[in-house]
Amino acid sequence: MSKLPVRRSERAPRKVEQGNVEVIEPAPSANPFVTFRYSYTEISASGGKARVKSRSARFEDGKLTSETFDGELDRTAYERMVSEAQHQFLAQTTLLMNSLSWLLPFAGKHRPDPD
């Protein structure tokens, strides 16, 4: 027993002529619902050589793509890269600390010189 107050009568499907049917293709999706990107890079040093491993995977436009790279480079290039990374990290940390220094209680106060 249906809980609806009115019942619809049974209808047979209509027949459509072949010439009157228009097929509408879906619009290409400019912004897909699911997009996934993952990348990983590892650089390690052992002896006189440095080893680089890089992996990436992405799912875009219904297509899964994966890439892998393994290689070696000279130890001096590795040391230069680490030095530059440390320098950039310290520069960014300095900028952050300087922007927050006004919150400290001694900010803007000058200490007298002990003579």
Image (cartoon, helix red, strand yellow):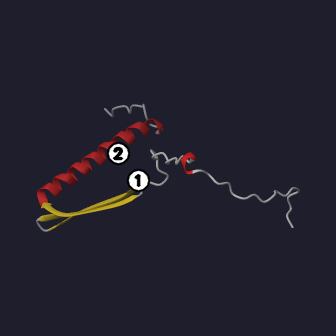
Image point (49%, 48%), residue name: 25
Please tell me how crowded label 2 is: few (under 14), some (14-19), or many (20+) other residues with Cα within 10 Å: few
Between label 2 and label 1, give the one nearer the viewer. 1
Question: How many labels, in total?
Answer: 2
Indicate which disc, 2 or 1, sits on the residue closer to the N terminus. Answer: 1
Q: In the displayed structure, would residue 29 be above or below residue 103? A: below
101 or 88, which lies in front? 88
Circle on res. 61 = 1
Q: In the displayed structure, would residue 85 be above or below residue 114? A: below
For marks 2 and 1, give the CA distance.
Answer: 39 Å
Callout 2 amino acid: Thr
Q: In the displayed structure, would residue 67 be above or below residue 18? A: below
Circle on res. 93 = 2
x and y percentages locating residue 50 in the rendered image: 16, 63
12 or 59, which lies in front? 12
Q: Secondary structure at mark 1?
A: loop
Callout 1 amino acid: Asp
Image point (37%, 31%), residue name: 112
x and y percentages locating residue 110 in the rendered image: 39, 31
x and y percentages locating residue 69 in the rendered image: 23, 62
